[in-house]
Image (cartoon, rainbow, N blue to C red):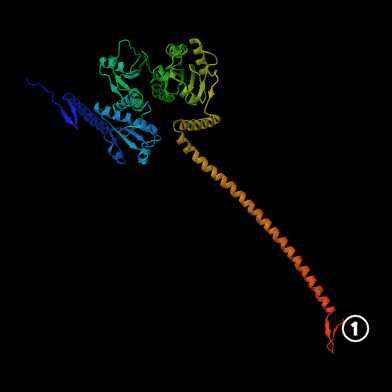
Amino acid sequence: MRRMVPFRGCISGFPFSIEAMAGVKVSLFYGVFAAFLGSEVLAFVEDLDDTFKETRVNDIWLVDFYAPWCGYCKKLEPVWHDVGAELKLSGSPVRVGKMDATAYSGMASEFGVRGYPTIKLLKADLAYNYKGPRTKDDIVEFANRVAGPAVRGLPSKQMFEHIMKRHDVLFVYVGGESPLKEKYNDVATELIVYTYFFSGSEDVLPESVTLPELPAVIVFKDGAYFTYDEYADGSLTSWVNRERFQGYLQIDGFTLYELGETGKLVAIAIIDEKDPTEESGRLKMLIQTVAREYREHFSRDFQFGHMDGNDYINSLIMGEVTVPSIIVLNTANEQYFLPGQPTETVEQLVQFISGVLNGSVPAQGGDGFIQRFKRVVFDARSTVMSVFRSSPLLGCFLFGLPLGVISLMCYGICTAETDDGSDDIDAIKREGLTDEEDEEEGEEEGEEEAEEEEEVGGEEKHRCSEGPKGEVALEKDPEEKKMD
């Protein structure tokens, strides 16, 4: 009887079964597919050059202006590739590109690039800045929102209900053509970077919504709706800017930056979400209660929320706040307010916020000269410390080398002044010694001349003369001859 022997291939002397060979083929297939997909993702993000200004007109572009040496730009790079892939695969009309702003600085300046990375959506003659979190979902949502029409239509109640489920804050214009609609369209064009704008007839709204008059602008949020009143709320732009956030938020650095543009004070419960405590939960609940139940009193002037950790707040106030605690920030002038006593009840928190509003609670910080000077020192110290924490060797090189050069320059200057002084003193001394030597030489010459004169006089007095017989006789002076 013939035995069935399993077939074995041989690669480099090692036997493989058919199952192993099949696994290798599958692995190779997935490897090739992954490489192909990676190359496609890279192709979704286009490298732009100085010809971009002429070629961009007919398309909508989402562009990352970066610098090769920027650490934040390198961190954004993989996210940017994901953004390109997401927009391409979803059929979005937005094209994604990136431009080296240091190589094409003139082009970057024309688009108003002041820092790196800068994300802009370019649509016709308009350029919209992205200021939100640098995550794929947030950037894609921004691109799709701005790329579409500034005001989107609501054709039915079903569409309205669908949109309400997707958005926490919803602005709707209700009515026909009017001057208010023109203002609404202008505001939507300006503020589309922050939120969506819709329009529709009164029929698409829920039956629970009653409007005193038409046309009207409504904002739906926090489970309720609020109508714009031109006389009570001021300009439509200011009202939309104030109402584009929910009454209560989880606040981070990006959100706090955007809240600064609303002109509101920000009341924050600082908590630690990684290590929640009973006190943290209580303060968070107090802030939520005030935001919900005292909206009529504070919504125009205050934004409420909580923040995880105190690092960002500490950098803003250049100090230390405890966790958990409550703080009110005025981002317009960098002032902040702290409760003078522990906040135990809603009434105490309302009293504190009312005191901030009427000025009875003293403000700390600010943007005066002393505070600006402290800010410069604080930022410089923070920068140096962060560099040394992340890379001690780089910190030594960046700060040690300039300090060493400055020290050598100071030493050289001081040494040069000392040498000049010593040279002057030596010259003066040499001049003094020369004068003394000249005087001494003059005195010596005078003494020598006097001695010579005396010697000459003595010789004349005792000059010898030779007699007729060869005798030597002393010649007498004429006076001596007269005496004789």
Which quadrant of the structure image shows residue 130?
A: top left
The answer, for residue 118, to whether it is visible in the render is no
Q: Which residue is painted at 30% across and 12% down in the image?
A: 206
Residue at label 1?
481
Front in this rendered view, residue 337 or 450: 450
Q: Residue furthest right?
A: 483
Using a 10 Å C-alpha cutoff, classify the residue at mark 1 as few (fewer than 14 neighbours), some (14 to 19) or many (20 or more): few
Quadrant of the image containing the C terminus? bottom right
**Left/right of residue 439 with respect to residue 276 in the rendered view:** right
Quadrant of the image containing the N terminus? top left
Front in this rendered view, residue 369 or 325: 325
Q: Position of residue 299 (x, y in %)?
A: 43, 17
**Left/right of residue 264 with respect to residue 173 in the rendered view:** right
Q: Position of residue 194 (x, y in %)?
A: 36, 24
Which quadrant of the structure image shows residue 144?
A: top left
Kind of residue at disc 1 = Lys
**Left/right of residue 13 with respect to residue 443 in the rendered view:** left
Q: Residue furthest front?
A: 1
Q: Residue furthest left?
A: 1
Vertically, is 474 above or below 63?
A: below
Vertically, is 441 above or below 467?
A: above
